[in-house]
Amino acid sequence: MMDRAWSLRVAGRVVASTAAVMTLGCAAVTSSAPVASAAASTLTFSVVQPFSGPTAFEGPEQLAGCLAAAALVNKSGGVMGHHIQCAPTDTKGDPADAVPAVSKMLASTTGLVGVIGPAQTAPSTYKLISAAHVPMFSDCGCPTLDHNSTPFYFRIDPSDSLAGIAMAYWAKSRYGKNAAEVFTNGTGGQTTVPSLLAEYSRLGGKFVFTQTLVLDQSSYRTEVAAMLAKHPSVLVTEMDPQTAGTYFSEVQQLDGGKFPKVEVTNLALKGAWIRAITSAIGNSLFAKDFVAIAPTTPRGPGYRYFKKEVVTLGSKIQDPKQYLTDSYSIADYDSVILAALAMNEAKSTTPSVWRKYVIPIANGTSGAKVVHSYAAGLHAIKQGKKVRYLGGNGPFDFNKYQNAAAGFQVFRYQPSSHVEKQIGAVTLAEMKRLTSSR
């Protein structure tokens, strides 16, 4: 049984669940077992992400990280004898769908100990999860949570406001003073824009063209022609895969096969995005003219554990190799490992108890032993030692608002190996310098 025979308590009542299976662009994953004594030995992390809709590629991406971590935890005996599992909750990437989906998840999941997510629907759902006293490890870049005040919300990737600053810095320093900004109007599509525009101007650049695209239209020829008429030195953008494939195919047609330089958020590192772009314009133009700005993803000892495990998920996730360099998948993997270590340190699987141990293990305390895997951390904890977990993405470095800090890396696609190569960086030190006056 879980410690203290813990059950999920929502709105003052104890609730349980029946088994559910979701098949959402990936292999079926059992979300929870029928209510019984055996079910209490399984701890569930709900992956609250879009598994359908325009951003459906995000769900399997986050699930991959959770599943890789769960496998490694379970290979080491689980958490105090309890195995863990990952269960998808489909938000469809839309706040209107996310709220009932999260409410149902909270009311029906047996053994719920944590949430991986939510993503861009966090502003509409994080209070529901917090009210249930369930820790969440969110990849939402939404600036509205830059000053988060709930102790159950941990942001594991840097804010979009920081991403905008990094993109502006790289665009100005590498491509000159005249830029175009084209972002979609979908959930999360605009959250990078304010800091991007402000920082580029502060650095002496000028956006000669700005535009908001409606998602997934059949053609963008008018919008493309308007952008090309301004002759920008760089196009800074974020689009979902379908929009990007259509838009850049028409850039190629209208610009005689030529391209401005294109700077994209970390969407350009995702398998679905790469497939859409290369199908539309080919490998060579994508490799030549596009770069991706993504949170720093170190390749240290912690990463090797993730890399070894994620490739074994072929029966559960389509093409798991596409997530090998995905900072979001890696961050979700690190989150589950971090949570599992926190439970062991707390000697409790009760979420309101173990969440207090997340920051000390993530940021480290005096004399803490640095560990890069669950097995090493568990061994140290059993010896009575304090630990600091440095995983696949390196340190989280949570600030007082429980938001992770990071530098950013710049990647270019390599068609010969179908992976990305790092070509530069906006380091954590540079980010601190750029934001020091804010």
Image (tube, helix red, strand yellow):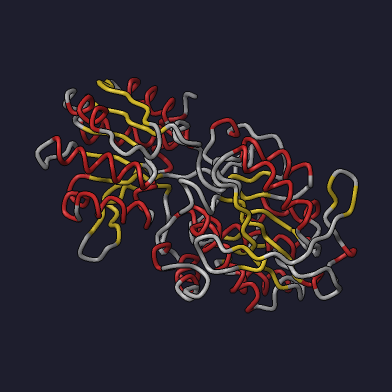
Q: Quadrant of residue 263?
A: top left
- Provide residue 357's location: percent of width, then percent of height: 72, 54
- Which of the image's four quarters has the N terminus? bottom right
> 63 above or below 162?
below
Q: Is residue 312 left or right of residue 294?
A: right
Q: Is residue 254 visible?
A: yes
Q: How many marks?
A: 0
- What residue is at 67 percent from the left and 71 percent from the top? 378
Q: Give me the residue at 32% from left, 33% from top.
A: 169
Does the image show residue 205? no
| Residue 280 rendering spot, x and y as whole percentages | 23, 50
Closer to the camera, 75 or 359? 75
From what the image shows, is residue 257 above or below residue 59? above
Residue in the picture at 77% in, 56% down: 108
Q: Position of residue 337 (x, y in %)?
A: 62, 63
In the image, what residue occupies the spot 24% across and 66% down? 417
